[in-house]
Amino acid sequence: KTIMTKLFVADVDGTLVNEYSEFETETIEAIKRFQKLGGTFMVATGRNPWELSEITCEVEDVVLNCVNGAVLVQNGKTIFSEYLGADQVRLAQKLCDKYDTPVEFHGEQGTYTCWDKKRFYQRAYPVFQRSFREDPKDVFAWIYEKKEMYFNKTLEQIPIDCIAKIEVLFMKEDIKDELICEVKEAFYDANIVALDMMANIEITSACANKAKAISRYCEVMGIEEDEVVTI
């Protein structure tokens, strides 16, 4: 018995994009061919929806399983979301003010921070210098010029009810362990990942999960488990 693949799911970084984080023409064409056969293509990634404009501009109807399952978007419409609460956003800002550490709030339309661009860069510089071979200025431009990044915003200017991920960044070594402990205690009911490379902590809803997002999409679309392929 031949089972047609109705839903094909692929990660972005390390799978769909090349070493320069670009979608190659061959990849785009392969996705389009699969769609013409009647299949649905989904990307499952830790990226934000607006960071995938390169593929959404080239391929229609692609499903975006973003922020590690916190947001599911198709054709610009949010199918479902697992946002963090506004109180959690306020708490994160309070903790980061206490430790004089930058924090990013990732929403569907962009990323927001209360720090101004110059101060943000000054904190990022030594981390980039330690972590990348390229000039820190080039790294900063590559990361933040491509983002829908909004600097110097107050919490009143940020859509705190629609934040999918909180990211505490560029922690100084002398406060890093203490801050991580406080974050874990304060956000005991959330997903928390601490990453050494960028000296950061990522916080998402406890309900955010790529596999759960795939399952929920299949339920809505009437797709069976054996009709799904993931890579």
Image (spheres, rainbow, N blue to C red):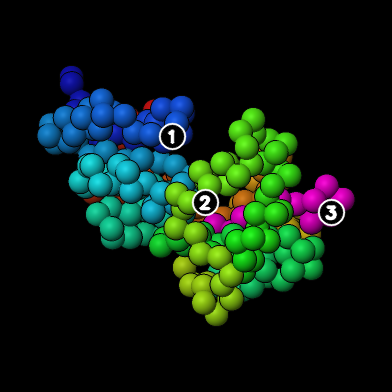
Magenta-drawn segment: 164-179
Rendering coords of residue 167 (x, y %):
61, 55
Query: Residue under circle 2?
Result: 144
Q: Residue at x 40, y 41 (%)?
A: 44
Q: Secondary structure at mark 3?
A: helix
Ranked by sequence position, the earlier of labels 3 and 2 is 2
Rendering coords of residue 129 (x, y %):
70, 38
Ranked by sequence position, the earlier of labels 2 and 1 is 1
Q: Residue furthest top?
A: 1
Ranked by sequence position, the earlier of labels 3 and 1 is 1
Rendering coords of residue 143 (x, y %):
52, 46
Q: Residue at x 32, y 43 (%)?
A: 54
Which mark, residue 175? Answer: 3
Picture quadrant where residue 155 is located:
bottom right
Compared with residue 71, is residue 114 higher up or lower down, i.e. above or below?
below
Is residue 207 something one can see in this rendering? yes
Q: Residue furthest bottom?
A: 156
7 vs 19, nearest the viewer? 19
